[in-house]
Each structure stands twice: as C-alpha cells, then as structure tokens.
Image: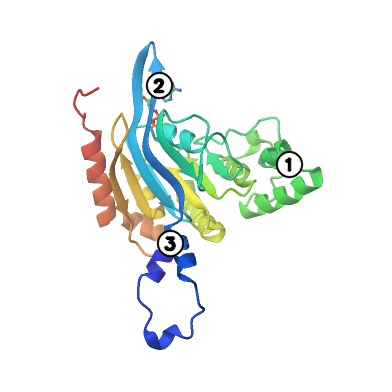
Amino acid sequence: MSAACGAQATPPSLARFLPAVDAATQARHETLDAIELHGVRRSFSIDGRELVALDDVSLRVPQGSLLCVVGPNGSGKSTLLRILAGLIPAGAGSVIVNGTAVTGPDPRVGLVFQEPRLLPWRTVMDNVTLPLALAGWSEQQRVERGTQLIGQLGLDGFERAYPAQLSGGLAQRAGIARALAMEPDVLLMDEPFSALDALTRDHLDEWLLSLWQRTQSTIVLVTHSIGEAVFLADRVVVLSARPGHVVADIEVDIPRPRSIRDAAAATFTHAAMRVREALEAGSEPLGDAA
Ligand SMILES: Nc1ncnc2c1ncn2[C@@H]1O[C@H](COP(=O)(O)OP(=O)(O)O)[C@@H](O)[C@H]1O
Ligand SMILES: [Mg+2]
C-alpha cells in the first residue's frame, strides 16, 4: 500500500511543504516484515514413513499487506498457516512473526478456519468473546469489546443467537470476530469463505477488504479460487504439489479500492493468468526425488 505512494520522487519545489520524516523511520516502515520464513520444512510421520508436507519455503510478508496463498490439495497450505499460528512447529528453518521467532500461539496472531468452529452451546456474544474470557477480561470489558466486534462484523441483533440459528455467512463472520477479539496484527485465514455460496463469498470478500483497510493488519489468506486471490491480494504465492514449495510469487497490480465488479474482470487479468500457469506447472508430479 505505502510503497506505491512512496515510489515517485517528490519534486524539489514541493518537498519543503512535506513533514520531515527521518530516513531511518521511513526505511523501517518500508522494510518491516510481519512474517519472515526461511527454509521452512515440515514433515509428518505416517505409519513409520516420513511424509514431507513443506520443503524449503521462504517468504516475506510486509506489514499491512494482504497475501493470498494458492496451491493444489495437500500442498501444505494449512500446515503453513498452522506453523505461522504457532500450533505446530516447523521441522527446520526459521519462522519469524512480528519480529520474534514463533514458539507457540500468540494473541497478536488470529486464525480463521474454513468452518467457523463455534461452540454450539454458547451465544454469538459468548463465542466472539471467548478469547477475552480465556485472557481473564472482566465481564464488562468483554461485553464492551464484544459489542464493538459484533457491530464491526455486521452481526448486530444476533448477540444472543446460537450458532445453529445462524446462516453460513453469519457464522463465519462470528468466527472472524472471535479471531479479531484480541486485535491481532496478523490474521491468518484458511479458505475462510470456500464453504459459502458464491454471492455470500463475494460480499464477504469485499467486506474483508474494507476491514483490512480499516485495521491495517497483515492478512495471509489461503484460497482455491484464483479470482478471489487476485481480487484480494497484493501478492499471490503459489505452492507446488507436495512437498509444497513456492513456485511463484506474483504481484497483483490492480488499483485499490477494488470492487466486486473488478473481481469478475480480475479472472482475466495478467496476474490471474500467471497464477494459473504457475498452478498448472506446480501441480505436475515433481519426479520421484522423494
Ligand atoms: N497432522 C498430520 N498428520 C499427518 N499428515 C498430515 C498432518 N497434517 C497434514 N498432513 C499431510 O500433509 C500434507 C499437507 O496437508 P495440508 O497442509 O492440510 O495441505 P493443504 O491445506 O494444502 O490441502 C498432506 O499430505 C496431509 O495429508
Ligand atoms: Mg488445507
């Protein structure tokens, strides 16, 4: 977002009207990465056999950017998010989020799954504020923050509803509200809208962009949809078939703000074509090196 504005040199005649930003601060803002992965590898042991899910994944995600990850089934996308969220360790390589090595779950990192995973016996308000309860917030603080989140996510009127009474789109928004409860700087989303109908998904994609623009958080979103990836992302990273590694890292230069009309057009953009080509290339068997 910021790099685009800073790219052009300011004419000398205008420079004196601009606030002085010291060079070190500017450089920090331009280079700070929310996520840095170097040589990440992760394998699982199945019946005594080692199955390599991710191999030599290196990736940088600048603060405040929106990165989409696409890749064939089993290419390690969910594994990658789980490593970033501190739910499982990497087998090798380094994983740095917000400047520190990941050693476990961190409240500054939110995770949204494909299905909302709400507790059926708790109301929307109690589901959304669950992380706050676990963190020891008082009831008054929880209700205050919960009401704010429910408003932000357009769930007003559903505070006392139970998950079974919600449509798929509303339930997923409640799941997102819960992930946002602790105001994470980094939001990880694993195919968050893929179980929803196309129209609801389009609306939630637009809504996600407005939320992202308001909160300035860093988002890493896994999707199967090239159109969705290109519509949402600053960059799209394509993983190969297992073992997943980065086969392409494609910048999306569609100007913002983007609308859902752009989403349809986005399917035909240069960026989308490149994502498709990389996916096709990465989906082919990589030989029997394993
Ligand atoms: N807990 C686990 N135990 C064993 N194998 C796993 C586990 N989690 C993932 N895998 C395997 O790792 C590979 C990558 O899985 P996953 O990250 O879920 O891929 P994706 O999300 O891209 O579909 C798959 O072959 C999967 O079966
Ligand atoms: Mg997955």
Give the camera-side residue of 72 and 30.
30
Give the camera-side residue of 162 and 136.
136
In this view, the mark in front (2 or 1) = 2
Give the camera-side residue of 99 and 121.
99
Give, as a three-letter code, the residue at label 3.
Glu
Q: Quadrant of the N terminus?
A: bottom left
| C-beta proximity under 8 Å, tags 3 and 1 | no
Give, as a three-letter code, the residue at label 1.
Arg
Give the camera-side residue of 89 and 258.
89
Q: Position of residue 102 (x, y in %)?
A: 51, 38
Q: Mark 3 vs mark 2: which is more N-terminal?
A: 3
- Crowding at label 2, few (<14), some or many (≥20) Cα neighbours within 10 Å? few
Q: Position of residue 44 (x, y in %)?
A: 40, 21
- Label 2 within 8 A of ligand 1 by Cβ: yes
Pointer 2 residue: 44
Give, as a three-letter code, the residue at label 2.
Phe
Pointer 3 residue: 30
Q: Mark 2 vs mark 1: which is more N-terminal?
A: 2
Q: Mark 3 vs mark 1: which is more N-terminal?
A: 3
Which residue occupies 49% across, 51% down?
A: 218
Q: Say if 85 sits above or below 88 in the image.
A: below
In this view, the mark in front (3 or 1) = 3
Which residue occupies 66% across, 50% down?
A: 149
Q: Give the residue furthest to the bottom.
A: 13
Which residue occupies 71% across, 45% down?
A: 159
Labelled disc at residue 160: 1
